[in-house]
Image: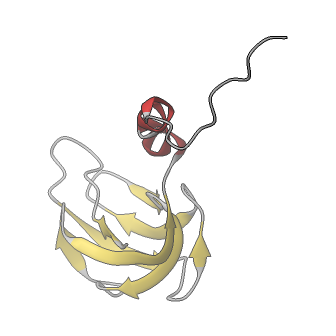
Amino acid sequence: MSIDVVMPQMGESVAEGTIIKWIAKVGDTVEKDDPLFEISTDKVDAEVPSPVAGVLSEIVVPEGETVEVGTKVAVIGGDVKASAPEAAVDAPAARLAPVRDAAPPAPAP
């Protein structure tokens, strides 16, 4: 599974950002919230964190390029790990699944 990383909106009126520097390189393993790249907008300069844990498999927008908010700038692929809240969504269904092939309880002596 791969996750697209997009240019974030760093303020209400911010429409675009310039990638100043890629902190992570293609092939690097990143954890959720590790800094991926630095951006500059007309309002702020900031580091952008990784939205998920995984391997940075592609950089779509090179350093120095300006793109609109929402533009895909990179792809995190490989072993993408779901965050705890997403993994917890399936937990109740697993507990409620019927148990088959279970032995009946032994009678009390």
Q: Position of residue 45 (x, y in %)?
A: 41, 59
> Looking at the image, which residue is at 60% across and 76% down?
29
Pick the front one: 90 or 31: 90
Residue 26 sits above or below residue 6 on the image? below
Q: Position of residue 100 (x, y in %)?
A: 49, 41
Q: Horizontal placement of 37 versus 103: left or right?
A: left
Pick the front one: 41 or 38: 38
**How many numbered marks appear?**
0
> Looking at the image, which residue is at 46% across and 78% down?
21
> Looking at the image, which residue is at 79% across and 11% down?
108
Residue 95 sits above or below residue 62 on the image? above
Pick the front one: 15 or 51: 51
Residue at the extreme right: 109
Q: Position of residue 84 (x, y in %)?
A: 54, 43
Residue 1 falls in image quadrant: bottom left
> Looking at the image, which residue is at 37% across and 85% down?
59
Q: Position of residue 19 (x, y in %)?
A: 35, 75
Residue 65 sits above or below residue 33 on the image? below
Residue 104 sits above or below residue 21 on the image? above
Q: Horizontal placement of 100 versus 2: left or right?
A: right
